[in-house]
Image (cartoon, helix red, strand yellow):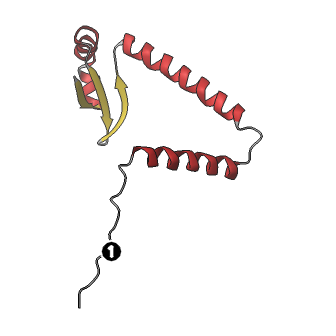
Amino acid sequence: MITETNAVSFRQNLGEMLSQVQYRRDSIVINKDGKPVAALVDARLFARIRRMQERFDGLCSRIEAGFAEISEAEGLAEIDAAVMKERAKSRPPKPAKTAVKAKR
């Protein structure tokens, strides 16, 4: 479960919230001035997030290296073309329009 709290309440109830995260595997979003600024998650979830971030960073580096010799405009055009091609595959075909002749 994800709980939201403000920073003052978080400070006042830190021990209880740590227990909530540790034993119930809940997550707590800490808001300041009504906006989320931090989250308290259990250590196992945080480790997974870090591993995923490392994998994502590695993937970004490989993509960057693969496009190093291509201009930004050319790379973006290639990406747009690939996206359009994939979207066209997933769309159902449009029904053919039939011409209706008016009778006189």
Q: Name the residue located 34 percent from the left edge and 67 percent from the top edge.
A: 97
Q: Name the residue located 31 percent from the left edge and 30 percent from the top edge.
A: 30
Question: Where is mark 1, residue-wise?
Answer: 99
Q: Residue furthest top?
A: 23
Crowdedness near tag 1: few (<14), some (14–19) or many (≥20) residues, C-alpha within 10 Å: few
**Horizontal arrangement in the rendering, residue 53 relative to residue 38 (left or right):** right
Q: Name the residue located 27 percent from the left edge and 14 percent from the top edge.
A: 21
In front of the other: 90 or 99: 99
Q: Is residue 81 above or below residue 57?
A: below
In front of the other: 50 or 103: 103
**Which amino acid lies under the numbered mark 1 shown in the image of this protein?**
Ala
**Horizontal arrangement in the rendering, residue 50 relative to residue 79 (left or right):** left
* Disc 1 element: loop
Q: Which image quarter holds the N terminus?
A: top left
Q: Position of residue 11 (x, y in %)?
A: 29, 24
In front of the other: 42 or 79: 79
**Horizontal arrangement in the rendering, residue 86 relative to residue 37 (left or right):** right
Please tell me in which quadrant of the rendered image residue 49 appears: top left
